[in-house]
Amino acid sequence: MLADLGAILPEGIALELDGRYQAMFSYKMKNYALLDDTGRLTITGSGLRSRGLELFQREWMEEMFLHLLKGEPQKIRISPDDTPKRSSSIPSTSANS
């Protein structure tokens, strides 16, 4: 399958298999969020994991990515005032870039 997909891509674009995931959000090169089969969220890349982000911003982004990747965009909270305290029930991991 990987070879078949690679054959139809433009020159200079190569595919690598790094595992299987339910869903992926790609922000830009080397900046993405992955949702695995257990519901665990992995966020990778400095564009999404910036140290300049406040804790509430990072927590909101994790919640937003989780809902987006699960196909539940209506559950994304728009206002920071609507964002509840972090729940330990949200499974997540962070990968450093």
Image: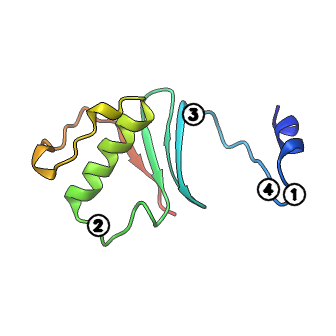
Q: Earlier in the sequence, mark 2 or mark 3?
A: 3
Q: Which mark is residue 75?
A: none
Distance in Å between CA atoms under marks 2 and 3: 26 Å
Left or right of residue 34: residue 84? left
Q: Earlier in the sequence, mark 4 or mark 2?
A: 4
Residue at position x 50%, y 61% in the image: 45
Q: Decide: few, some or many residues near mark 4? Use Cα within 10 Å; few <14, some 14-19, many ≥20.
A: few
Left or right of residue 40: residue 88? left
The three-letter amino acid code for the residue at tag 4 is Ile
**Residue located beneath label 1 in the image:** 11
**Residue located beneath label 3 in the image:** 21
Decide: marks 1, 4 in contact (CB < 8 A)? yes
Distance in Å between CA atoms under marks 3 and 1: 25 Å
Distance in Å between CA atoms under marks 1 and 4: 6 Å
**Residue located beneath label 4 in the image:** 13
Task: Describe the colour scheme in one phrase.
Answer: rainbow
Left or right of residue 85: residue 94? right
Residue at position x 18%, y 43% in the image: 86
Decide: marks 2, 3 in contact (CB < 8 A)? no
- Nearer mark to the viewer, of 1 and 2: 1
Please, is residue 66 above or below residue 28 in the view?
above
Q: Decide: few, some or many residues near mark 3? Use Cα within 10 Å; few <14, some 14-19, many ≥20.
A: some
The three-letter amino acid code for the residue at tag 1 is Glu
Say what secondary structure mark 4 lies in. Answer: loop
**Residue located beneath label 2 in the image:** 53
Split into 4 quadrants, where in the image is the N terminus?
A: top right
